Image (cartoon, rainbow, N blue to C red):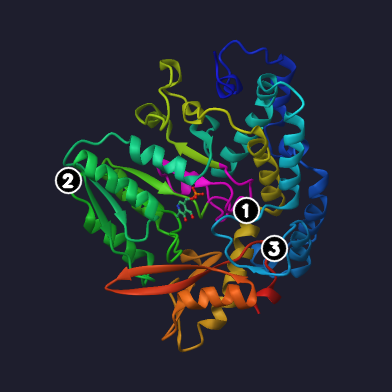
Amino acid sequence: MDTPQERQHGNGKSGFAPERRHFLKTVGGAAGLAALFGADALRGVEAAVAGTTGMTPQQAAAEETLWSEVQQAFSISRSLVNLDNGYTCPAPRVVTEAVIRYIWEQEPVPYGPYVQESRDKMAVVKTGLARIFGCDTGEIAVVRNATEALKTVLYGFPLKPGDEVLTTTQDYGSMVATLRHREQRGGIKLTQIDIPAPPKSMDEVVGLFERAFTPKTRFIFVSHISYTTVMIFPVKKICDMAHERGLEVVVDGAHAYGHLDFKHADLDCDYYGTSLHKWLLAPKGTGMLYIRKPYIEKIPPLMSGPSPRQNARMRKYESVGTQSMAPLIAIGEAIAFHNAIGSKRKEERLRYLKNYWAGRLQKTSKIKLYTSLVPEMSAGLAAVGIDGVDMTGLQEYLWEEHRIRTSRGIYARGEEVQWVRVTVSLYTAPSELD
Ligand SMILES: Cc1ncc(COP(=O)(O)O)c(C=O)c1O
């Protein structure tokens, strides 16, 4: 018997009505997303955005009339200051309400037909996700988070003893642990390039990669934005260098998708994994995996074996047993919200807010920023330390005494350094940063 997911994705026997297929075809674009998902709830934000017509995204970034309307779209508590939006970001009200609405829709009816009925909405969700990324819909799978997306590739990439994988000291611990696991199990070698915090320039980082390739390197694993010093990596240059050598690149996009305004062509990576509950502001427990079409077949899913006819399809990564459809469908509302604000406008607002606090602190002699404020090297996050101050203690103090939530990091490079990571969101008000 088919699982609900197999039914959701179709088994060739679906009774999907032809008029619905037509509907899908005609609403697959951005207008379709708004029509299907929460158009009314977005009207205030759309009107405020229309009020910035004629402004560049950089000018709109400082236009508080727009952003106070955006702040109203969230249901966050103003009794605390949340500057830990890199863990997962509170979703706008339109998304939360959609999750609840879809739960109410799915509960009174048998689940099989409901999952089947959800297919058109999920197709629109995937069209929207692929459009933001600038790839074919057949190259993405909706998964549960960046962890699932990236581990699928890191565990599944075919390697033999003696092969080498290149990553950096700034890549996410759990992904590095996966590669270490492969080292122990399969006799491969993992090399971590030591990246300064911050590097002087993108070229310095490119040079470090260039020197680290060996004839045994098989693939590169690199973050689009690192979780530690939160720098933007020169992914396109790294991909170009790798491709010249016949190598593939896996990119950890957990902090970049929905945050930076970019398309796949700006990176040209072969694999990309991201959470959608971070910067796209989608429901918690949602993520996306991209694989360049010719490589889909060689990467097995983490769970279960696909039937041979599924092996070249991204759907094989979505067969993880029964799930609630509600958060998956509500990704559509998050896409509509993202599109209503506009990708570039969003990136520039997040960068503006980061510069608002970090630019001022930079002028203080005891402050050390581990993140470069050069626009191409950072956007909405920055990591900061203070000479002679225990930053772990400071992070606890800020939360316990002032209800200001940040996250903390430790980075061992020669000597161990600690910092506090400050991550703004679209609902952050400059007064909170003051
Ligand atoms: C760079 C990076 N990659 C991957 C992840 C894992 O994300 P998730 O827990 O949503 O799977 C995180 C989480 O913070 C991260 O910072």
Q: Residue at x 67, y 63 (%)?
A: 56
> Which quarter of the picture shows residue 37?
top right
Which of the two discs, 3 and 1, labels the residue nearer the N terminus?
1
Disc 3 to disc 2: CB gap under 8 Å: no
The vertical placement of 333 against 68, above or below, is above
Which of the two discs, 3 and 2, labels the residue nearer the N terminus?
2
> Which quarter of the picture shows residue 105?
top right
* Left or right relative to 175: residue 83: right
Extreme residue in the top direction = 13
Q: Residue 287 in the image: x percent, y percent?
A: 54, 42
Q: Residue at x 68, y 16 (%)?
A: 16
How many residues crowd mark 2 within 10 Å: few (<14), some (14–19), many (20+)? few
Identify the amino acid type marked 3. Tyr
Q: Residue 314 magenta-drawn?
A: no
Q: Main secondary structure of the magenta part?
A: loop
- Residues rendered magenta in the picture: 257-286
How far apart marks 2 and 1 lie (CA) works out to: 39 Å
Relative depth, front residue between 161 and 236 = 161
Dot 1 falls on a residue whose secondary structure is helix
Q: Mark number for residue 343?
A: 1
The vertical placement of 365 against 311, above or below, is below
The residue singled out by tag 2 in the image is 215
Q: Residue 274 in the image: x percent, y percent?
A: 50, 46
Identify the amino acid type marked 1. Ser
- State how many labels appear: 3
The mark closer to the camera, 3 or 2, is 3
> Which quarter of the picture shows residue 103?
top right
Which of the two discs, 2 and 1, labels the residue nearer the N terminus?
2
The mark closer to the camera, 3 or 1, is 3
The residue singled out by tag 3 in the image is 427
